[in-house]
Amino acid sequence: MDELADLTEELVAIPSHEDETAAGDAIEAWLRAETDARVERDAVGNVLAYKYDPTDGADGPADTLALVGHHDVVPPADRQTTGEGITGEYVVERRDGRIYGRGAADMKGAVAACMLAFRDAEPPAGRELAFASFVGEEIGGTGARHAIDEGFDPDRAVVAEGSTGYSKPGVTDVVVAHKGRRASTLVARGEAAHASEPELGVNAIYRASDAIDIVRELDKPEATVFGETVSGSLAVTIVEGGETWNVIPERCEVTIDERTVPGDRADLGRVAEAVEGVEWEVEQDLPPMGCEDDAFAEATLTVARAVHDELGLDAPEHVIKPHATDAGWLAVAGTECLVCGASESGEAHTDTESVGIDVLDRCYRIYKGVGERAF
């Protein structure tokens, strides 16, 4: 456990909100020093590693299981750096069994657990074990998308994002599905006129209002994964239109936050078709994830339950995560994914971000156990 805590502190101390290079350097150097794996660093800074023992006589691995994380973080708060604003070194503290610092929970602690599990696990015959720490997760999964485009395609992956405290406090659950996020804008266009003669123009705000009425009536995305209902959501979050009080507005923008689910999305295209002068634009589309490999999901939960039982903890469950992760990009590319990690709800991105050392150890045991288990 000391090695895991020390490695977590080392990674957390390295600033990586603007440039992930130094953090990637540390991960790469550790993997080269501590393992005999094939270690790669791609053009955008992702760190990838693979190990496979061909002693079974096969020409190549029958399947690949990846342990996946990311080493970029969101900008730190003032209290999380030694300098002014976000320009200083990161502050890392260990107290009361927890490690405090930007990225401790999201997700350098889990990356450290993956690194140790990757080193220590002895995969079954025919299994290639992979490790990946991506850049750019916090800005839309740019690193994961690049790796996928360059051929990163494991059969299965455990993505080490937070899953602790979902079914009950103090338990690290196994996420079988998570929501995605589609950010859209409805742009309503009209014709300007003086407000004293509104009939001479076309009010873009009125057109936007008609569009909003349709959005409110659309069915929300919904799916079922492992018998659990995954419900999405749809909400207008920003309306911007008009320039001054006495001019009929010629443009109005409506921002929509949609949480998507595996296999279903709201029919927003219908809005633009129904209202004259309204166009629909997609700004961001982070895909959802839903695992369809029952054997993988059940085996991982069995490992997680065995670890919890050994530690005298309540049993984890299969759960649904509300937040998008890099698992969505991997799932779209054909990888069967699960999410399991140390971060608790409400820890990530806060100015008091921290992670429990005992939970990191628990995750290490789960990752190692899954790496060694046949499916």
Image (tube, rainbow, N blue to C red):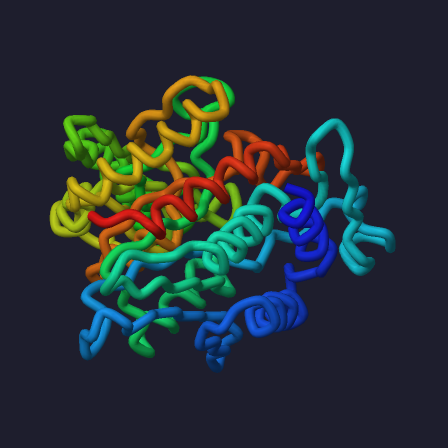
Q: How many marks?
A: 0
- Location of residue 352 (image quadrant): top right
Q: Residue at x 42, y 40 (%)?
A: 366
Q: Position of residue 30 (x, y in %)?
A: 61, 67
Q: Nearer the viewer, residue 6 or 201?
A: 6
Q: Quadrant of the N terminus?
A: top right
Work out whether 19 lies above or below 252.
below
Q: Is residue 120 left or right of residue 212?
A: right
Q: Position of residue 306 (x, y in %)?
A: 37, 29
Identify the residue at image location x=48%, y=76%: 39
Q: Is residue 208 visible?
A: yes
x, y (%) of residue 193? 38, 52
Q: Is residue 372 above or below residue 231?
A: below
Residue occupying the point 46% across, 58% down: 118
Kindly give the residue lying farthest to the right in the view shown: 83
Give the residue drawn at x 34%, y 70%: 52
Q: Quadrant of residue 319?
A: top left
Query: Residue 166 placed where, x, y %?
Result: 41, 25
Name the side, left or right, on which 280 lies relative to 6. Answer: left
User: Which is nearer the eye, 150 or 261?
Assistant: 150
Is residue 197 visible in the rendered image? The answer is: no
Comparing 294 with 16, the one in front is 294
Of 202 and 117, the residue lying toward us: 117
Above or below, comparing residue 320 to residue 92 in the picture:
above
**Residue 97 sits in quarter:** top right
Residue farthest to the bottom, as pictured: 43
